Image (cartoon, rainbow, N blue to C red):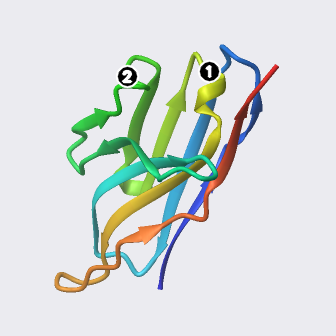
Amino acid sequence: QVQLVESGGGLVQPGGSLRLSCAASGRIFSINAMEWYRQVPGNKRELVATITRDGTSNYADSVKGRFTISRDNAKNTVYLQMNSLKAEDTAVYYCYAEIRTTILIRANTWGQGTQVTVSS
């Protein structure tokens, strides 16, 4: 069994910063892309940032220049550094990883979500 555990969410004032972490554990052969999504109640889940195993990253236009995704392959962990936070960044943030438990078996997995609230 594979799981992703997120941490680092919370309440922050506009203009502030937070760093989210997401650690994968269990039977892991390899992890390809790792991604962060966010969702506001009543809306679709939105892709925020993605990073490949070799470190290539992409961002949603709404967070470019403010958020940075990174990963530590030795720790099977992905991070999301969020700076200059705005009220519209308020959402539940989910991590997602393309995991293989063996060379043939995929176990793409979602984290449980962590709440980020930006408010004064």
Which of marks 1 and 2 precedes in the sequence?
A: 2
Q: Tell me what residue is drawn at x 48 percent, y 42 percent.
A: 79
Depth check: give the residue in front, 71 or 86. 86
Q: Amino acid at mark 1?
A: Lys
Location of residue 44 with respect to 19 vertically, above or below: below
Depth check: give the residue in front, 96 or 103. 96
Which quadrant does the C terminus fall into?
A: top right
**Residue placed farthest to the right in the image?**
120
- Secondary structure category for the residue under label 1: loop
Q: Position of residue 103 (x, y in %)?
A: 18, 81
Q: Which mark is residue 67?
A: none
**Residue placed farthest to the front in the image?**
42
Disc 1 target residue: 86
Location of residue 90 with respect to 93 vertically, above or below: above
Q: Quadrant of residue 108?
A: bottom left
User: Gap between marks 2 and 1, in whole Å?
Assistant: 13 Å
Location of residue 53 with respect to 61 vertically, above or below: below
Badge 2: how crowded within 10 Å, few (<14), some, or many (20+)?
A: few
Depth check: give the residue in front, 96 or 55. 96
Give the left or right position of residue 10, taking residue 71 as reference. right
Q: Position of residue 29 (x, y in %)?
A: 29, 75
Q: Amino acid at mark 2?
A: Lys
Badge 1: how crowded within 10 Å, few (<14), some, or many (20+)?
A: some
- Secondary structure category for the residue under label 2: loop
Q: Tell me what residue is drawn at x 64 percent, y 52 percent.
A: 41
Q: Which mark is residue 64?
A: 2
Q: Quadrant of residue 57?
A: top left
Q: Position of residue 86 (x, y in %)?
A: 62, 21
Q: Tell me what residue is drawn at x 35 percent, y 53 percent.
A: 34
